[in-house]
Image: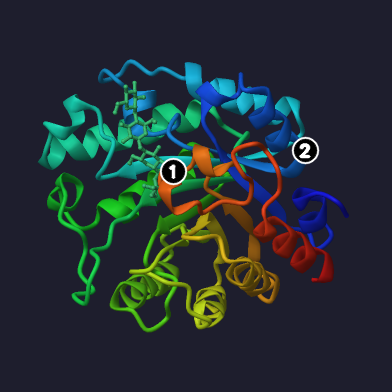
Amino acid sequence: ESTLGAAAAQSGRYFGVAIAANRLSDSTYASIANREFNSVTAENEMKIDATEPQRGQFNFQNADRIYNWAVQNGKEVRGHTLAWHSQQPGWMQNLSGSALRQAMIDHINGVMAHYKGKIAQWDVVNEAFADGSSGARRDSNLERSGSDWIEVAFRTARAADPSAKLCYNDYNVENWTWAKTQAMYRMVKDFKQRGVPIDCVGFQSHFNSGSPYNSNFRTTLQEFAALGVDVAITELDIQGASPTTYAAVVNDCLAVSRCLGVTVWGVRDMDSWRSEHTPLLFNNDGSKKQAYNAVLNALNAG
Ligand code: G3I
């Protein structure tokens, strides 16, 4: 196959991309995105500050621009993200305790109702664990509302849209030996044992010099899959875009039957949140980088 999405589809997987609504009018960007990818994640437009800027007043204008573009072009959509410490609107930042808990529940219900039956996977909770060696939860207003906030979010989400796969999503959880990875593993294991509804774990995979790719990523994916959840690579970008590393990540997903697919976090380097790292698969002029060829070859070989 000659595109990433078609090549991934040979093994029943998708190859996705993060889309920014305001770039869809750039024809180079839109044509690459449409040609190469068969899954779409909104880079910012489905986040809490975008979808509920005032309490109880939902706004899906930019989210729907991306959703409609994706569906019109035959792509599935990953929802990102419903409960997160970051990119909260001001009104939510100012809440705590039971008021925040209720606002989180109302937010999940409001957004998931709008997209009911239309989203393949939702990142229900994003980035709830701390970096470093503690293995602790990240401090946030949500965590201070009671550490059961994560399972409340998942139970709310299941009731709101039983057809969506419900994911927990985080970064710096790709290396099996890291405390953050082990903490996330213990949570997912506990959720499965207690029947908290969770279907998938997203590994963001923002690799850089401080958090480099390690070949034990495949072990991580296998260990989580063995708990009875699907896994996905949800925000892949690699500082310097080494073709070897890109191929290794793709091969890790292909090696795990429960790995649903790979999403890269932007189209061209200039579209990246860290463009100075030139971490993506396309040059700014829209041409394919070596990493692109490495990924395509890996998908076609798998
Ligand atoms: O839209 C405003 C614009 O109106 C304003 O003039 C400008 C000035 O700063 O800011 C614009 O908003 C920026 C937005 O991206 C859209 O470009 C925000 O400042 C900026 O903070 C925001 O960054 C996003 C970041 O999440 C925020 O947390 C990145 O685009 C997005 O790639 C990044 O994505 C996250 C994932 O959601 C979760 N995992 C990590 C990943 C990378 O940080």
Check the picture and name the quadrant holding the N terminus.
bottom right
Query: Percent position (x, y) of residue 255?
Result: 69, 76
Query: Percent position (x, y) of residue 5?
Result: 76, 49
Query: Percent position (x, y) of residue 276?
Result: 42, 48
Residue identified by numbered label 1: 157
Split into quadrants, the picture shows ligand 1 in the one at top left
- Please rate how many residues cluster around mark 1, counting C-alpha atoms within 10 Å: few if below 14, some from 14 to 19, many from 20: many
Upstream in sequence: badge 2 or badge 1: 2
Position above or below: 58 against 28: above
283, 34: nearer the viewer = 283
Q: Is residue 28 left or right of residue 7?
A: left
Q: Is residue 81 left or right of residue 299?
A: left
Q: Is residue 242 left or right of residue 294?
A: left
Q: Secondary structure at mark 1?
A: helix
32, 96: nearer the viewer = 32
Residue identified by numbered label 2: 35
Q: Residue at x 66, y 25 (%)?
A: 69
Q: Residue at x 70, y 62 (%)?
A: 295
Q: Secondary structure at mark 2?
A: helix
Query: Percent position (x, y) of residue 105?
Result: 31, 37
Amino acid type of the residue that numbered disc 1 sits on in the rendered structure: Ala
Amino acid type of the residue that numbered disc 2 sits on in the rendered structure: Arg
Q: Residue at x 41, y 74 (%)?
A: 189
Counting labels gives: 2
Q: Is residue 138 visible?
A: yes
